[in-house]
Amino acid sequence: MTLTNKILDFKIVFVSGLESLIEQIATKIFHYPQNLGMPITPEYDTKQYSMVEYLAKLPVHQTNFPPPAAPVTLSQVFFGNFPEMSKIEKTFYEHKSEGFYNFYVPNYKNIFFLPDWLSEWLQINFNVSIDTTPLEIIQQSVFLGLIGFFFLVEFRMKLYWFLTINPYTRPWIYLISLTDWIQDFMTGLSPVMLGVDLTAPIILGLTGKLADSLNHLVFTMPFLPSEGQPGKMMIENEVQDVILFRYLPSLWYTNTIPNSIREFWYTQRPDILNFMQKNYAHLNIEFLPEYILKEFSQYQ
């Protein structure tokens, strides 16, 4: 028997043994042949297919980053204007059957919300309900901070093209030191192409993407994001896709309604209080403010 035949016999024995081992594992662990494994093509899901088709037809919320210069006054022409976000606006409306705190937002492919658990945590622990001004201030501050960091990285990148300037001398080193930490972190991760370090362009791209994504973030308080319902509304004589938040927020049912809101209803908007008591009395929700409830308990 030649060496070639011996090698061939060894291959046959090895493959046969491997085949037997795999079959035993598949039989004992994965119940083969009753379990044939994952299907080659997923089962046709009409609901999922219709949702994919619906999302494909949605428009994209168009934004620019950095925000374009749009001076209004003479001082802004010379010194620049304050960068403004291109946020997705919420539109509140009242309805005789849906209530007083309904709102809708235009539906886009790139719109996104906070996770339900985070939205619930913010509303319960920080008393953020109808007025989302504190969150919007944080959103705007992070946006401006990212813009400032973007321009610092851009300035650092441009500074290296001036051969007569040593960036590690004063006053340039103060600006360089603000971005040294991200530069050091990304240096080992970013590639070098034709002798040019791509760290700065990659940082600019990531910073711009992160800052621009804040334009597409919508706060849904007092509702949870999962309570939104896709729908259509006539806006400016045009039918547009929207996400509707209406009726009673679920957190007002599972938790107590914030006392400040109940006091506002009782003292300034009795029509809202009457609507809530008439339509949601069967849910055993307290709609009266705390001091009124305490007075009732004292009289009883």
Image: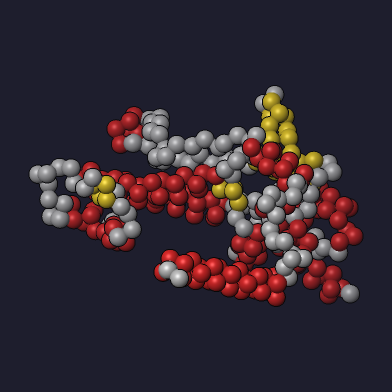
In the picture, measured across the screen, residue 141 lies left or right of residue 189, that is: right
Residue 173 lies, in percent from the top left, at: 18, 56
Q: Residue 17, located in which quarter of the rendered image?
A: bottom right
Quarter of the image with the N terminus is bottom left
Q: Nearer the viewer, residue 66 or 236?
A: 66
Residue 130 seen by the camera: no
Q: Nearer the viewer, residue 194 or 220?
A: 194
Farthest residue in the top direction? 237
| Residue at (33, 58) in percent of width and height | 189
Residue 72 lies, in percent from the top left, at: 40, 30
In the picture, measured across the screen, residue 5 lies left or right of residue 97, that is: left
Is the residue 242 above or below the residue 190 in the image? above
Residue 73 lies, in percent from the top left, at: 38, 30
Farthest residue in the left direction? 164
Residue 233 lies, in percent from the top left, at: 73, 33
| Residue at (72, 61) in percent of width and height | 36
Q: Nearer the viewer, residue 248 or 46?
A: 46
Is the residue 292 above or below the residue 80 in the image? below
Q: Nearer the viewer, residue 205 or 253?
A: 205
| Residue at (44, 53) in percent of width and height | 142
| Residue at (86, 61) in percent of width and height | 283
Residue 84 seen by the camera: yes
In the picture, measured across the screen, residue 151 lies left or right of residue 169, that is: right
Farthest residue in the front direction? 1
